Image: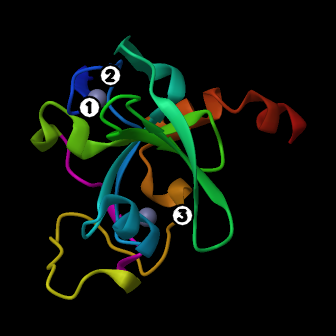
Amino acid sequence: MDVAREGGCACGAVRYRLASDPLFTHCCHCLNCQRQTGSAFVINLLIEADRVELLVGAPQPVEVPRDDGSTQVIFRCPSCQVAVFSHYGRREVSFVRGGTLDQPSSVEPDVHIFTRSKLPWITLPDSAPAFDVYYDSKVLWPATSLARLEAIMPRARSDA
Ligand SMILES: [Zn+2]
Ligand SMILES: [Zn+2]
């Protein structure tokens, strides 16, 4: 059963609602995420961009350089500048920052990634797989999530 979750920035100028459960939830220990958050890792809820319904406000896109030379678009509250979600390559999928949920405890990571730069004092749970770098979504994602992803990538499918 899908759960609708709400969240927002610190000042309340941005509020959002997730129309369904995420596709998959990452806990990313990469150096980019550590730098962006000033913390040990980020929790990203991957979800179709159109399922992030803005209730209040309009997060502003900020292009942020990454170590590999690419940029990541991070959407921030225009007032308090808290980052609420970001886009990596494809715009169809938003990466919602788990700490901005009203109830961050309502999600748990499905996978830990980039553990090669995990801070040494963090012990990972046995409940989720962990990878030095990345993983194969076709192997790890539930079939329902893979179908949802395919549904928002119609061009790739028709070209195949
Ligand atoms: Zn704000
Ligand atoms: Zn990362």
Disc 3 residue type (three-letter): Asp
Q: Are marks 1 and 2 in contact (CB under 8 Å)?
A: yes
Rendered view: 62 above or below 140:
above
Question: Of the residues tagged 3 and 2, which is closer to the observer?
Answer: 2
Q: Is residue 85 visible?
A: yes
Q: Nearer the viewer, residue 34 or 156?
A: 34
Query: For mark 3, what is the residue?
Result: 136
Q: Is residue 1 visible?
A: no
Q: Is mark 1 within 8 Å of ligand 1?
A: yes
Residue neighbourhood size for the residue with mark 3, other residues' Cα within 10 Å, grouped as few (<14), some (14–19), many (≥20):
few
* Residue 144: image tag: none
Rendered view: 112 above or below 89:
below
Q: Earlier in the sequence, mark 3 or mark 2?
A: 2
Query: SS for tag 3?
Result: loop
Q: Earlier in the sequence, mark 1 or mark 3?
A: 1
Query: For mark 1, what is the residue?
Result: 9
* Residue 14: image tag: 2
Magenta residues, start to end: 107-115
